[in-house]
Amino acid sequence: MNILEDKSLRFHGVGHNILKYISILQNGILTKIDSVKSELYSKNYGGYNQNNMISMAISPSVFGTYKHGAYGVFISDGIGFVLKDCQGIRSSTTNHHSGFDDEEFHIGSIPVSKITGIILNKGLSQSKVTDLQLFKGMGSGFVDSTCDVIIKYLQKNGIEDINIEEINNILNKKNTLDSQGLDFLDKMKREEMLIAELNSIIVNYLEKYFKQVLGKDDISIMEIIEHYNDRRLPIYDELGILINHIEINPNSAVKNALNSGVITTDVLNVVNQQTKDERNEGNGEKEKFE
């Protein structure tokens, strides 16, 4: 079954913020009130949810929001989570309607136990760390705080050669654009250029960090996703098709399981075939996504 066809499930996205992905696997999805529980907490935009709420998207199969709405905008092109038993309040029924008919607000933080799967954009899965767009879709006012969270985490975990002055200079240029009397479009263009410049610097430090963690130079986003996926949650692409991470990345954990008899090559072959069948079924359904 395509995971997106289950109308009881909810979804939450973190864009390309790979560190936020790690934090959520460890701490759950935290509200602003509970943010002290994680050193990696950050927000991408102001949103309409309150300090004690989490924004979620209902299944895109309900309104066809595969490429628009909350699912299409905030989940389908990055990293997200599948949530079970997380009913929320439809934003359109509140005074905080976001304009997305498929958005709901969950009251309180969402525990790890309710995270039952991972959504990973297929194109992003085989990209490199330096391809990440950390600030994509992020409100300009949240770039500074997110940058600060990332830098502090990297410094704490062995990346000590970060050029703070260079980063602060870019942030200062961004934050003084309002005082330069620029027209709106010119201001937006310059802001985008500065944020892109900042992103290119930060992702290089991130790449250095993950090379250190995984002990290798050539690393895909999929490998990082799997490395921190201790619960072995199923991973789906943005169309809801299961990605067979066993087949894509036969790492030592799978080899050990085979060697110890926990799984057999026959079982592995069945899993691989099932995944291929699901992909073929998914290819037949692509017209409704395009």
Image: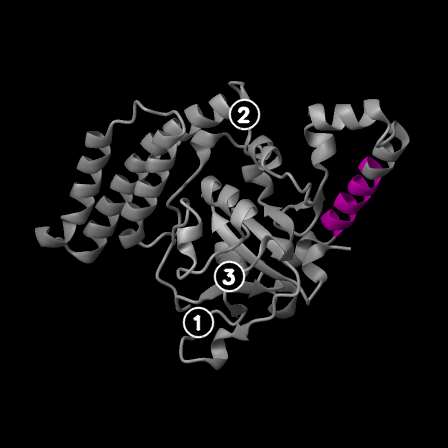
> In terms of secondary structure, what is the magenta stretch mainly?
helix
Residue type for callout 3: Ser
Circle 3 sits in a helix, a strand or a loop, which is it?
loop
* Residue in the foreground of this view, choosing between 102 and 283: 102
Tag 1 residue: 99
Q: Identify the image quadrant of residue 202.
A: top left
The answer for how far apart the CA atoms under marks 1 and 2 are is 38 Å
Local crowd at mark 2 within 10 Å, few (<14), some, or many (≥20)?
A: some
Task: Count the numbered circles shown.
Answer: 3
What range of the chain is rendered magenta? 272-284
The residue lying at 24 percent from left, 34 percent from top is 167
Q: Amino acid under label 2?
A: Ile
Tag 3 residue: 109
Q: Quadrant of residue 154?
A: top left
Q: Position of residue 37 (x, y in %)?
A: 44, 51
Mark 1 is on which residue type? Answer: Gly
